[in-house]
């Protein structure tokens, strides 16, 4: 049973930075892909960034050059460094884990979410 717990959300002015963290626990050996998704009020979910076990990363176009995904395998943690934040980045951010990338909404394991407000 895998559990994901996000932290690090908050309110920030446009142009500011935030770093989200996701701590995972349980049997994670089968997981090859971890990432972040977000959902803004009135909008559907959007995949933001993903990282594979071999550290290959991918980003949605709107965050390229501003967001960086990383992981600390020893600490069982996933991170999302967000810089130059814009009002359109306002959303609930969710950590996800899946067998392979891209992670799928119905197949992935999800955290409870952390709110980011710009």
Image (cartoon, rainbow, N blue to C red):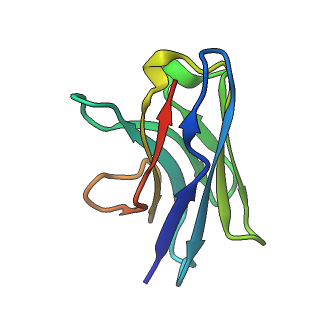
Q: What residue is at 68 percent from the left and 70 percent from the top?
A: 76
Q: What residue is at 29 percent from the left and 52 percent from the top?
A: 105
Depicted 45 relative to depicted 89: above or below: below
Indicate the position of residue 61 as horizontal and vertical percent values. 51, 21
Depicted 76 relative to depicted 102: above or below: below
- Give the side of residue 103 with respect to residue 32, left or right: left
Is residue 81 in view?
A: no
Toward which corner of the image does residue 72 lie, by quadrant?
Answer: bottom right
Depicted 71 relative to depicted 15: above or below: below
Toward which corner of the image does residue 25 lie, by quadrant?
Answer: bottom right
Indicate the position of residue 103 as horizontal and vertical percent values. 40, 52
Q: What residue is at 66 percent from the left and 15 percent from the top?
A: 15
- Give the side of residue 64 with respect to residue 61, left or right: right
Q: What residue is at 40 percent from the left and 39 percent from the top?
A: 38
- Give the side of residue 75 with respect to residue 88, left or right: right
Indicate the position of residue 35 as horizontal and vertical percent values. 52, 50
Question: Which quarter of the rendering shows the N terminus?
Answer: bottom left
Toward which corner of the image does residue 45 lie, by quadrant?
Answer: top left
Indicate the position of residue 27 as horizontal and vertical percent values. 53, 84
């Amino acid at each position: 049973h895998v559990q994901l717990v996000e932290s690090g959300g908050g309110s920030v002015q446009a142009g500011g930075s935030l770093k989200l963290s996701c701590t995972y626990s349980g049997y994670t050996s089968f997981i090859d892909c971890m990432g972040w998704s977000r959902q803004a009020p009135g909008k559907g979910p959007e995949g933001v960034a993903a990282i594979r076990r071999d550290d290959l990363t991918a980003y949605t176009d709107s965050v390229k050059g501003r967001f960086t995904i990383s992981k600390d395998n020893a600490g069982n943690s996933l991170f999302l460094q967000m810089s130059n934040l814009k009002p359109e980045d306002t959303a609930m951010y969710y950590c996800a884990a899946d067998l392979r990338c891209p992670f799928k909404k119905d197949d992935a394991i999800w955290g409870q979410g952390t709110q980011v407000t710009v």
